[in-house]
Amino acid sequence: MLVNMTKILEHAVENHYAVAAVNVWNGESVQKCYEAASELRAPMIINVSGFVKDMEWIAGAAKYWERKYPEVPVALNLDHGFDFDMAARMIHYGYTSVMIDKSSLPFEENVRQTKEVVKMAHAAGVSVEGEIGHVGGLGFCAPDENGNINFSYEEDSEELTTPEDAAEYLKQTGVDCVAVAVGTTHGVYKKEPKMDFDRLAAIKAAVDKPLVLHGASYSGDENLKRFVEGGIAKINIFSELAEEALNYSQNYLKEDDSPKIFLMEEQGLKGYKEKMIHFMKLFGQTNRY
Ligand SMILES: [Zn+2]
């Protein structure tokens, strides 16, 4: 069943596990999320970024697979929402959660724009994720003048979250959960990462809402486990899944003398799902309903 993300994250916080939030790009990737969650009896968060061309179709696919797997609690979440308009559109499409990411703006402006989205989303029963501090590595922030989103990972200044800012941001905005910068980065690490577990502990002690980790790919299983133990409730992870999907498709192309498009795609989705299951088990979200 499609549910508000707060419901999923509150259960995760109470029971000390984290839920993977994986990005999708078409109806079949949505299907794989439902399959994995059903097989593991796990709650699931489906992330949809602005680089997906038809975000309404993803909502349609999520509703279709919801009918096939009614027992699976799924939050359909707008990932890194650009602005108020985009959040409103997604809520209209049936998304149960929206992120508004104004983390590259000064504190007051981040609060101001986030608050507006919270007011609108909560009126519709939709949960909101914000971000304070700034997780680097994400090249796109908004569409260009033609409405195209240039999806690329670029050098992007990161700014680690302070416990004081996190507490104040939550108080002023009323968001339901918050993404914090504690040493991870989006995409591939360009320099040796420094995972700041002490900072996470201090933030955790200062706030009473679920914490979200972005940029989990290539952080290493041991570090991710420590983040879960440290109180992270939602982990955004995609680049490693996407890489595994490509590996599977490329291996298939090497091995089959007369490759078929549908088999290549099937192999890619298989790799995507296997890696997804790996992380879902690591985060402790199996057998939760
Ligand atoms: Zn992110």
Image (cartoon, rainbow, N blue to C red):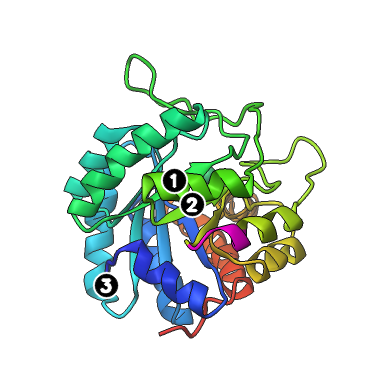
The residue identified by callout 3 is: 1
Residue 222 shown left or right of residue 12 in the figure: right
* Residue 259 seen by the camera: no
Q: Is residue 138 above or below residue 225?
A: above
* Front position among marks 1 and 3: 1
Residue 32 at what x, y percent from top left? 42, 64
Please state the horizontal and vertical placement of residue 43, each as a whole percent of the image.
42, 73
Per the model, the C-alpha gap separating discs 1 and 3 is 24 Å
Asked if 198 appears above or below 69 in the picture, the reply is: above
Residue at x 39% of width, y 18% of height: 144
Query: Spatial distance from mark 2 to mark 1, Cα to Cα?
Result: 5 Å
Magenta residue span? 204-208
For disc 1, the marked residue is 130
Viewed as shown, does residue 14 lie left or right of 67? right
At 33% across and 40% down in the image, what residue appears?
115
Q: Residue at x 36, y 63 (%)?
A: 5
Hey, what amino acid is under mark 3?
A: Met
Residue 61 pos. (x, y %): 26, 57
Residue 164 versus residue 226: which sits nearer the camera?
164
Q: Earlier in the sequence, mark 1 or mark 3?
A: 3
Query: Given the image, on which type of amino acid does mark 2 rest?
Result: Val
Give whichever of 209, 190 is nearer the camera.
209
Quadrant of the image occupied by residue 221: bottom right
- Report the amino acid beneath label 1: Gly
CB-based contact (under 8 Å), mark 2 and mark 1: yes
- Asked if disc 3 and disc 2 are in contact, CB closer than 8 Å, the reply is no
Looking at the rendered image, the disc whose residue lies closer to the viewer, 3 or 2, is: 2
Q: Which mark is residue 178?
A: 2
